[in-house]
Image (tube, rainbow, N blue to C red):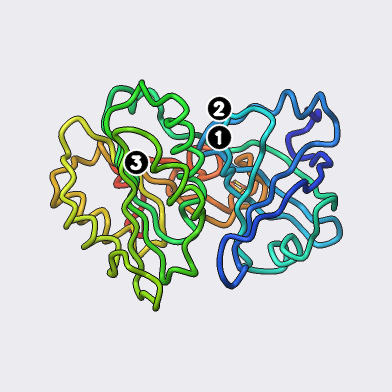
Amino acid sequence: MPESPLIPLVGTIDKITSETAASDIKTFQVSFDDPAVMDNFNYQSGQCAMLSMFGVGESMISITSTPTRKGVIEFCIKKTGRVTDAIHEAVAGQKLGIRGPYGNHFPLEMMKGKNLLFIGGGFALAPLRSLINNVLDNRKEYGRIDIVYGARSPGDLCFKYELFENWTKYENTGVHVTVDRGDDKWTGPVGFVPPYLESLNPSAKDSVAITCGPPIMIKMVLQSLSKLGFADDQVVTTLEMKMQCGVGKCGRCNVGGKYVCVDGPVFTLTQLKQLPPEF
Ligand code: FES
């Protein structure tokens, strides 16, 4: 790895998968050009890395692959501005810069032996996918697993190959998908994630809920989890926030006494409630 954590290393885009009908969300599989760096890139589910397009700029992106599958590094990226637009225009074989990994990670130790309830919305399934595949790769260490996921429309669902093919194959695992608006072909549930979650009535006993999504969805999901009997320390979430340095130096991601890039992005609800009220 480089002497300074702020120096990006050169990598190559190996594979690009379009996730949505509009192709506004794509998954990029990348590798470091130096095989030694590739072998030593150790990350945990929940961490992020800074990706850069040379001459354009850089952007912090969560890692969507799982560390349990060595040799594969993936980022799921939504077109949201100059840098992500440039990454979307790239083709396989193109170079990019990678620095990281940054931030804390999902607390796997507190999840061992527990039932796990994942709740995601839209593009925010990306960081959860890393953890979901991580726990599924160690399936025996966890209780029941339920994945509740929603998007605006069937065409906006990300990771359909995981939702409808891969994850449904595991025993004692449920995948529950809803959309805000169906279409001619959609035969599944229609409605927002929070009421759909409540209708599924998951048990809070011996469970941990892990959620990620747009702020409004998170707010409603937290209310639903409270109604379902989940205590604050049974709820884990990951925050999306603009970041610049990634190492606690620039102050861009400062929230109260915390830096999201170092102290987060993963927080329990107990920790979140200690942050200023806007969070
Ligand atoms: S991004 Fe610079 S302090 Fe967090």
Q: Residue at label 3?
A: 236
Is 113 on the left-hand or right-hand side of 92?
Answer: left
Label 1 neighbourhood size at 10 Å, few (<14), some (14-19), many (20+)?
Answer: many
Is 276 on the left-hand or right-hand side of 46?
Answer: left
**Could you give the CA–CA distance between mark 1 and mark 2, rounded to whole angstroms?**
5 Å
SS at badge 3: strand
Q: Quadrant of residue 4?
A: top right
Name the amino acid type tagged 3. Val
Position of 145 relative to 238 (above/below)? above
Where residue 144 appears, x then y in whole percent?
Answer: 27, 33
Q: Residue at label 2?
A: 68
**Could you give the CA–CA distance between mark 1 and mark 3, rounded to whole angstroms?**
18 Å
Name the amino acid type tagged 1. Thr
- Chain-order first, disc 1 or disc 3: 1
Cβ of mark 1 under 8 Å from ligand 1: the answer is no
Where residue 156 appears, x then y in whole percent?
Answer: 48, 67
- Chain-order first, disc 2 or disc 3: 2
Q: Residue at label 1?
A: 66
